[in-house]
Image (spheres, helix red, strand yellow):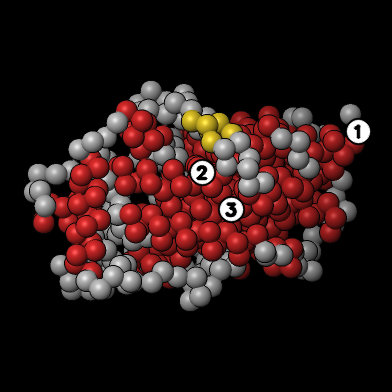
Amino acid sequence: MHEDKRRDYEVKSIVLQWYRLFLHLESKDTTAFPPISAQRLADMGMSGYLSLDYQKTMSFTQDETLELLNKVYSDALSNYYSHLDVTSKESIKILEHDISATISIPAHSEDLVTKASENIKNNLPYFFESRSENFCEVAESQSSGTQKDISKSKFEYKSNHAILPEWGQKKTIVVSKNKVTCEKPYAKNDEFDKALYAEALEIYSMSHNLTKDDIWVAEFWGDDVRGLTFSPPARWISILNQIVQKEEITAEEIIEVYLKMGIGLHDSAIVCWKNKYDHNLLRPSDFIQNNIDGSWHPFHDNPDFPAYPSGHSVFGAVGSRILEASFGTDYKMTDMSHSHRIEFVGKERSYNSFREMAHENAYSRMIMGVHYKQDCDEGLRLGYEVGDIINQTDFKSILVKDNYHL
């Protein structure tokens, strides 16, 4: 095999193995709320990108680079999932060992790789103020207490267990929170109350006429049962894994698309959460129970954070836009993310474009009964805006510094 092709193959193998394990472990992790997942994915994306850069910047050999890539992913997952069971933690050590066994580096290179890994980790706090903290502790510390008291209206979201209400105050990496934002819900309507009532009534009526296909769509895109599935942002990593497995793609292209996906999901999570708690709109079920039918319940339990905008919609739009930039606007694929599941309808579905996937993902939330149409519309618009910014960004100028000291 040609040397460049071998390198592409080996990088692809390492990346896919680690991201697949990430998805598997996240499905067990009850703290893997969407913003937490998105931050982890940005962390992995940047770590992988900087690892490959060492081959150019520090003249690492190909095998040293592969070992470094293996090590930074192992260190990252060990940080994210230190609170999981012994078997889960052991799976991280086993994968690192198995990959290392396929890579041949001299003894003196081991210290060099270890120092490079530490150097990468030391560079990342510039982007993540919590990088040195345990990710589980961050999730738990920000998932208790009450939501911000933003409004006093009868349409505000209320919960004693609001998830990550302060997440929107975190720093983004690329996107400006002041420039990329949402307008007030139903701002274009003369009467807020009537507009909200009309959309709540639409959800209520829809819930009484669900077809088998509706239920399939809703459960297929669910991804929001912590401890059972991976998270909504991680779904787009699952989709990316399937594409990378299938396509001939260079090592640099692989690393760059995971980097863009991770940072896009990270920044959009912060922007989304900021707007959720700024606008603090109650969920359809609360409105319907108070104004239409007191006994009504959504097809799926509400997540514990405000409705507007829809996080699923934001993540889907960001993910689809990034995939379009790498693989085209008319890419056809069958998503097998949940084809093995028996707890819900996860049978694979086929699509003619990433945009089609993003839109079905967004409007599945209306079928679920957990979002109004405007939540989904605005989520898509916001996500596409973030995705465009990510695709136009020169990440090398942001990430690669001249201070590598080994």
First along the sequence among labels 3 and 1:
1
Q: Is residue 341 above or below residue 271?
A: above
Residue type of the residue flagged with mark 1: His
Residue, far left:
294
Drawn side of residue 223 relative to residue 205, left or right? right
Q: Residues within 10 Å of mark 3 (few under 14, many from 20)?
A: many
Residue at x 90%, y 36% (from the top left corner): 3
Q: Is residue 216 visible?
A: yes
Q: How far from the left and from the top, in percent, is residue 22? A: 54, 40
First along the sequence among labels 2 and 1:
1
Residue type of the residue flagged with mark 3: Arg
Drawn side of residue 202 relative to residue 405, left or right? left
Q: Residues within 10 Å of mark 2 (few under 14, many from 20)?
A: some
* Residue at mark 3 to residue at mark 1: CA–CA distance: 33 Å
For discs 3 and 2, the disc positioned in front in the rendered view: 2
Residue at x 89%, y 29% (from the top left corner): 1
Residue type of the residue flagged with mark 2: Glu
Drawn side of residue 176 relative to residue 213, left or right? right
First along the sequence among labels 3 and 2:
3
Mark number displayed over residue 321 = 3
* Residue at mark 3 to residue at mark 2: CA–CA distance: 11 Å
Find out whether the residues at labels 3 and 1 contact each other: C-beta distance under 8 Å: no
Which residue occupies the foreground of this view, 2 or 195? 195
Q: How many numbered marks appear?
A: 3
Which residue corresponds to mark 2?
356
Which residue corresponds to mark 1?
2
Picture quarter with the C terminus: bottom right
For discs 3 and 1, the disc positioned in front in the rendered view: 3
Which residue occupies the foreground of this view, 97 or 375? 375
Q: Residues within 10 Å of mark 1 (few under 14, many from 20)?
A: few
Q: Is residue 257 visible?
A: no
